[in-house]
Amino acid sequence: MTLAQSAEISPTVASYVAFFLGVYIAAHIVVRQVAPYADGALLPLTATLTGLGLIVNYRLDSGDGRRQALWVVIGVVVFAATLILLRHDYRVLESYRYLFGVAAVALLFLPALPLIGERVNGVRLWVHVGPLQFQPGELAKIFLILFLAGYLREKREVLAQGRLKDFGPLLAIWGAAMLVIVQTADLGSALLNFGIFLAMIYVATGRALFVAVGIGLFVGGATLLYQALDRVQERVTIWLHPWTDERVYCALNGKLEFRQDCASYQLVKSLYSIANGGVAGTGLGEGTFTAPDGAELIPALRTDFIYSAIAQEIGLIGAAALLLLYMLFVVRGMRISLRADDGFSKLLAAGLTFGFALQTFIIVGGVLRIVPLTGITLPFVSYGGSSIVANFLLLAGLLLVSNRANAPKP
């Protein structure tokens, strides 16, 4: 990137690269000491994804790039600390399953509180306490998976028999989480957590009927939300009809505008960015993301739409390679789940991996107009400290399960 921008590699950049190489070597040493039998591919895959994220974020905004670098270091520290603290037996977390469930709901509720909750673009996702700003939904996702893994491991046999009373605590925690998410208008997290819920129910019980009923409930709930919430109607309309040949009412300025110049401006500009990349891309540092006056062509480019920036600069080939990295991560995660020899570990690995996969699909699918656009991040790549730290916790969980599954049995 620096070669493309300045035709030289300065000592500062060289030291920057050496520092992050050192960070991941240190992380690798911790893994080899604490979890020597863990999957050997996940940490290098994570290093590659975070490396690409750092490059793109620094290219788009050097200040954000430096802040993202700090969050990656914090994430690696949290990752190492988690491995060390839970090295003896992470299954102790199962004993606190209800605490994790309540904590997940509480975290999701925080953005709705006055004074600390912050609304951005019509959605309450953020909590602002002094200089600290974070997105509690990212950590709530991990806590919800821990609750589901613990509860479903305990009740999997009776749940498979379809006894309604055993669904009570499960539906109570899940329903509270969904209500809070809808109240804060965070529909991306609602879809993500609902998908995780259905996937883990299926893994625990093997009953496809439960998934079919869940999908039916989702369709019914989505229809009600579409009729009740203007925000949902707007997202669906943007998804189905981003361009108009005639001017329509624009809620942003109260005038008649083409939809591509108003509500769907962000999505349309993102699609143009991807198209501009072609097969091979414009080259790192050579993409066009600002107008001649310096204004951003794609709002929220470093968070929701970073995939479109990547697709423009490294083209279809590079964007497909990025998706293959995510697919490799998911395959290794599901393999860990299959190899796990106890119910809690199997469900935990499956939930963490499916959550990672579904989050990637939702954000990339939204940018590519496969599904309606929702405001969640691309794991390890998008700008955002909360997402980086939460995904490093996810990685630590998978490595702990993998180490136990692969360790020689006495």
Image: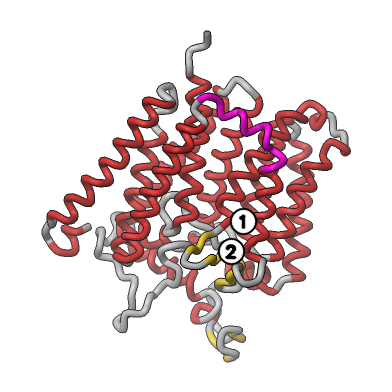
Q: Residue at x 55, y 77 (%)?
A: 263
Task: State the image coordinates of residue 189 (x, y, percent, origin top left).
Answer: 62, 56
- Which picture quadrant has residue 374? bottom right
* Residue 189's disc number: 1
Pointer 2 with pointer 1, Cβ within 8 A = yes
Given residues 305 and 84, the one toward you in this image is: 84
Q: Earlier in the sequence, mark 2 or mark 1?
A: 2
- Please rate how many residues cluster around mark 2, counting C-alpha atoms within 10 Å: few if below 14, some from 14 to 19, many from 20: many
Q: Secondary structure at mark 2?
A: strand
Given residues 111 and 234, the one toward you in this image is: 111
Per the image, is 98 magenta? Answer: yes
Q: Residue at x 61, y 68 (%)?
A: 117
Per the image, the residue denoted by label 2 is 125
Q: CA distance from mark 2 to mark 1?
A: 9 Å
Task: State the image coordinates of residue 25 (x, y, percent, origin top left).
Answer: 29, 36
* Residue 342's disc number: none
As drawn, which residue projects farthest toward the top?
A: 410
- Please rate how many residues cluster around mark 1, counting C-alpha atoms within 10 Å: few if below 14, some from 14 to 19, many from 20: many
Task: State the image coordinates of residue 347 (x, y, percent, origin top left).
Answer: 63, 32
- Which picture quadrant has residue 286? bottom left
- Which picture quadrant has residue 297? bottom left
Q: Residue at x 29, y 65 (%)?
A: 62
| 320 left or right, relative to 233 | left
| 250 left or right, relative to 184 | left
The boundaries of the magenta stretch are: 88-99
Q: For the residue marked with disc 2, what is the amino acid?
A: Leu
Q: For the residue marked with disc 1, what is the amino acid?
A: Ser
Residue 394, visible in the rendered structure: yes
Given residues 38 and 283, the one toward you in this image is: 38
Quadrant for the N terminus, please.
bottom left
| 257 left or right, relative to 53 | right
Q: Secondary structure at mark 1?
A: helix
